[in-house]
Amino acid sequence: MKKLKQILALAGVAVIALLYLATVVFALLGREFLNWLMAALAVNIFLPVILWLFNYLQKHKKGDDELELFRNLKKK
């Protein structure tokens, strides 16, 4: 499992690096690629945020036992 996480993390870094490179290329190509530049900028902002959010939620996920205990306490 640790090896899989390392591979996925490396793949994520590669994708983000390619997105940064694409943003620079679209910025240098000129006005006709403005829509592509805006799309690349949006992805460069939202993709890391979404990945961080998934990671945060995974780390702070409650187990089924904790949820069941919470529901039993609420009923009393």
Image (cartoon, grey):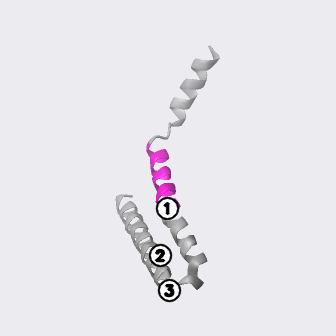
Query: From what the image shows, is residue 40 above or below residue 1?
Result: below
User: Viewed as shown, does residue 74 lie left or right of 27?
Assistant: right
Location of mark 1 (residue): 45
Q: Horizontal and vertical percent for residue 55?
A: 45, 51
> From mark 1 to mark 2, how far is it between C-alphas?
11 Å
Does the magenta stretch mainly form a helix, a strand or a loop?
Answer: helix
**Mark nearer the N terminus (1 vs 3):** 3
Q: Residue at x 64, y 17 (%)?
A: 75
- Front residue (pair 68, 42): 42
Kindly identify the residue that appears in the image at 43 percent across and 67 percent down. 12
Secondary structure under tag 2 reads: helix
Could you tell me which residue is drawn at 35 percent across and 58 percent down?
2
Residue placed furthest toward the top: 76
Q: What element does badge 3 sit on?
A: helix
Crowd band around label 1 with a 10 angstrom C-alpha radius: few (<14), some (14–19), many (20+): few
Residue 22 point in image, percent of width and height: 47, 78
The answer to the question of whether label 2 and label 3 lie on touching residues, with beta carbons closer than 8 A, is no
Image: magenta residue range: 46-59
Q: Quadrant of residue 9?
A: bottom left
| Amino acid type, callout 1 | Ile
